[in-house]
Amino acid sequence: MNPRMIGRTTRILATLAALATASSSRANLLVNGDFEAAPILGPGQSGVPIGQAKAIFSDPTTPLYDVAISGISGWTYATPVENGTGSDHGLARRNAEFGRPAGGQSAFINNWGRMMSQTVAVPLRAGDVLEAAIDFGTLGDDADGGRAGVFYLVAGQADPSDPDQFAAGSIILAQISAGNPTWSQFTPDVVVGNDVYTRLSLSYTVQAADVALGLPITIAFKTVAPSVGPTFWDDASLTVTPVPEPSALGLAGVGAASLAALAARRRRP
C-alpha cells in the first residue's frame, strides 16, 4: 500500500472513530447528581453525620438552624416555612439502612408535594434521545400507611415563584411513579420494597417540530400526598444521545465506501 493510501486510510478510520464517540456521548449533564457535594452551610452549621439527616434552614434566628443545613448545591427547591428560609427536605446519610456504604449522601423529602429539580440548557435536534434516571427508596414500615413519589422529565423548568410546581409552558415529556408496598392511594408504576433503592428510568426521543426544541430540560422529583414519611432520592442522571450531523453521516458513508474499495483492491491477485 502506498504512503498516500495509508494516510488516507488512517484519516478515515480516525473520522469514523470520532463519529462513533460523538454519537454515543452519554455524559451526565447534572451538577451534583449524586448529592455527594458538601451541603451549603451557614455560620455555626455543620455537615450531615453518618446515620442522620438534616433539613434546610438558613436563618440563624430559627429554632432548627443549628441542626440544619442552608442548602443543596445544584438543585432548585422551595423554602416555604420560617418566612421563606426553611423546608422539610434536605440531605441524608442513611444509606447504610439501604444496604449501601454508610458514607453515601442522598436527598430526602419529608412533606407532601415538595419538589426538587435541576434544569440544564441542552441544544436538541430531532432524533436526539433524552434519558433520565434516579434511585428511589423509602425506610417505611411494612404496616404503615405508605409513601410514594414521582420522577419527571420536563421540557421547561420549575416555576421561580413556586419551585414545587412547573412554570407555565413547561411540558412533561415522561414521568414515573413509585411507592412502597403499603402505598394504596393509587397503583404506582413501580412498587419499591422498604429499605432498598430502585432505579427509576425515563426516556424521550425528540421529534421534528417537537415541543422540547428550544426549551431547557428539567428533571424533578417530589413526594406524593399523603405519604407518612420521607422519600429518599440518589444518583440522578440526565444524558443526551445525539443524532449525528447529516454532514458527518455523509462523511462516514464516504469513509466506509473508501475502506470497502481499499479492501477489494487488496484481495485482487
Image (cartoon, helix red, strand yellow):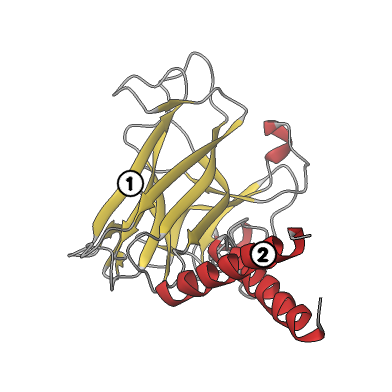
Where residue 176 sits, quadrant-wise, is top left
Where residue 250 sits: x, y (%)?
A: 46, 72
Q: Is residue 226 above or below residue 59?
A: above
Tell me whether circle 1 and circle 2 mark residues in contact (CB < 8 Å). no
Where residue 133 sits: x, y (%)?
A: 51, 47
Q: Nearer the viewer, residue 149 or 92?
A: 149
- Viewer-nearest of labels 1 and 2? 1
Q: Quarter of the image containing the C terminus? A: bottom right
Which residue of the protein is positioned furthest toward the bottom in this rendering?
4
N-terminal-most mark, 1 or 2: 2
Please rate how many residues cluster around mark 1, counting C-alpha atoms within 10 Å: few if below 14, some from 14 to 19, many from 20.
Answer: some
Q: Is residue 36 above or below residue 191?
A: below
Where residue 184 sits, quadrant-wise, is top left
Q: Amino acid at mark 2?
A: Ala
What residue lies at 67% left-to-right and 32% top-to-bottom?
98
Where residue 95 sits: x, y (%)?
A: 69, 40
List the residue tagged with mark 1: 174
The reply, left or right, for residue 268 in relation to residue 236 is right
Please rate how many residues cluster around mark 2, counting C-alpha atoms within 10 Å: few if below 14, some from 14 to 19, many from 20.
Answer: some
Looking at the rendered structure, the secondary structure element under dot 2 is loop
Which residue of the protein is positioned furthest toward the front in this rendering?
269
Q: Nearer the viewer, residue 176 or 74?
A: 176
